Amino acid sequence: MTIILNDEADTQRLAKAIAKTNPTGSLWLLGDLGAGKTTFTRHLLHALGHVGAVKSPTYTLVEPYDIHGKPVYHADLYRLDDPEELDFIGFFEYFDEPNSLVIIEWASRAKSLLPKPDMLINITRQADESRVVHMTGIRLDG
Ligand code: ADP
Ligand code: MG
């Protein structure tokens, strides 16, 4: 499925629609720096029911959330030097938690070690600041 997001309000609407499907498993967010991966994640976490700030996990690698009992992890692997580090922090255990959602920016940094994604969202920033979004594994029509 391919859609165009004209502005951040559209991104928020998409996040709300995806939140309604109770996404579980792993979600890879693809796209260049500034594409809108973290912005989308912020809207998704809020749409899932998180109240409060959403920090970019650029330096911490992972920010964990507990949203009404649903374990949600937001990872940004851009600064990952050694993929083995993921094992070290127990990253692979996140996938085994019931009903968990693991959102990963820059999954390409650890592609060989990560399980295949259940959902993919690829965001491309256009010259006019709109975003073209390709999605796989997400069923918006329920
Ligand atoms: P990334 O995590 O992909 O590097 P960010 O989400 O940190 O990107 O930054 C995206 C920037 O683009 C933000 O400043 C955001 O406000 C802006 N932006 C403009 N339009 C959109 C849109 N439609 N969706 C997401 N972000 C947008
Ligand atoms: Mg980001």
Image (tube, rainbow, N blue to C red):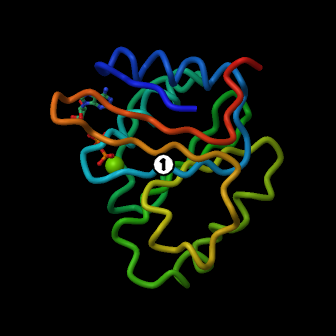
The relative height of residue 30 versus residue 59 in the rendered view (above or below) is above
* Left or right position of 95 against 122: right
Residue at 42% x, 33% y is 40
Q: Position of residue 101 (x, y in %)?
A: 67, 44
* Left or right position of 75 against 33: right
Residue carrying label 1: 29
Report the number of numbered marks: 1
Per the image, label 1 sits on a secondary structure element best described as strand
- Amino acid bearing label 1: Leu
Q: Position of residue 64 (x, y in %)?
A: 55, 48
Residue at 38% x, 81% y is 81
Task: Check the picture and name the quadrant holding the N terminus.
Answer: top right
* Left or right position of 59 against 140: left
- View extreme (left): residue: 127
* Left or right position of 24 against 129: right
Check mark 1 vs ligand 1: CB closer than 8 Å? yes or no.
yes
Q: Position of residue 106 (x, y in %)?
A: 43, 61
Q: Position of residue 93 (x, y in %)?
A: 73, 65
